[in-house]
Amino acid sequence: MSKDFIQYYNLWTTVEAWNKRYHSWLNDPFDELDPVQVEETVENAKKTMSQVMRYFRDKELPGIIKIADSIKTKVDEFAPQVPIVLALRTDGMVDRHWELLSEKIGKTVKPYEGFTFQKCMDMNLLDNTESIVDVGEKAGKEYNIECSMKKMKAEWANIELSLKPFKTTGTYVVGGFDDAAMILDEHIVLTSTMQFSPFKFFMLEEIEEWNATLLYVSECIDEWVKCQGQWTYLQPIFDSPDIVRQLPSENKKFKFVDKNWRLSINGTQEDPNTLRACTRTGLLETF
């Protein structure tokens, strides 16, 4: 493929893509506008048109130069709209952000049936680009926090306590807390980061409640490990008739502990989900 052909190819494919996409951006439903495609198309078109014009200017082809210059002018005129497209089409733009934006710029901007980006351009929003970008950033940051929270809660749905029989006692012990401890540490750090975010306030109460839950689960697991260690140590001892006769008072105390342990394990068998098991009413106090 000759160098001349490549430049012609780049010119015509860019012109075709620009004309087709530009019309689509302005007239298709606003919620179908792809901000990534807009940004990439504008950047690629600017780069390609500059290269093509430099090449054909030396070839003294005024007709080609005119076409390239026409597209370059259209691209340059639209380029300042790109930050607005990126901001308004940010994932997470919801009613509160549209209301905040309208308040900041003194114009009602909110998608409705039949809303297109052409409507935005007709509102002459370029003078408000900075405010629009600020609101878009806020929406994006809040959306990331919201998604992170949903992801954390969803992950706990699959974390269960594995129970295994303990000797011939007829009850069980937890096989290990490693999976829960690993995800717990990760989530406590992530939630702590959220608490320091300047974009947390839209769901501050939920963040604080979730943080309290994670800390409660952490404390419960710590106490559970201690209690299980003590119970598994004492159970064989007080399973001996001789020890029971020699230490009746201590045996009575152990029977109380043993009863609570079995009740706790029974509840965990019914619902082994780690988060729900550790937040079961009264469990931590039992340990």
Image (cartoon, rainbow, N blue to C red):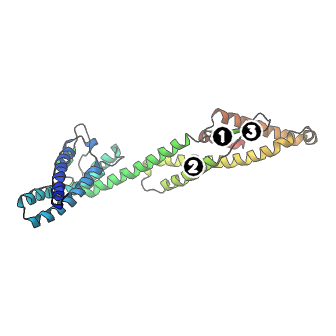
> Does residue 147 appear to the left or right of 32 in the view shown?
right
Q: Residue at x 48, y 45 (%)?
A: 151
Asked whether residue 123 is in view, the answer is no
Q: Residue at x 68, y 49 (%)?
A: 222
Query: Mark 1 highlights which residue?
Result: 162
Q: Earlier in the sequence, mark 2 or mark 1?
A: 1
Q: Residue at x 45, y 56 (%)?
A: 197
Query: Mark 3 highlights which residue?
Result: 261
Query: Mark 2 highlights which residue?
Result: 183
What kind of residue is marked 3? Trp
Give residue 269's position: percent from left, percent from top.
Answer: 67, 34
Give residue 210's position: percent from left, percent from top.
Answer: 53, 46
What kind of residue is marked 1? Ser
What's the distance in space between the residues labelled 3 and 1, CA to CA? 16 Å
Question: Crowdedness of circle 2 by 10 Å Cα count: few (<14), some, many (20+)?
Answer: some
Question: Crowdedness of circle 3 by 10 Å Cα count: few (<14), some, many (20+)?
Answer: many
Q: Earlier in the sequence, mark 3 or mark 2?
A: 2
> Does residue 26 appear to the left or right of 138 in the view shown?
left
What's the distance in space between the residues labelled 3 and 2, CA to CA? 25 Å
Give residue 189's position: percent from left, percent from top.
Answer: 54, 55
Q: Residue furthest bottom?
A: 58
Q: Residue at x 57, y 49 (%)?
A: 183
Asked whether residue 233 is in view, the answer is yes
Q: Earlier in the sequence, mark 3 or mark 1?
A: 1
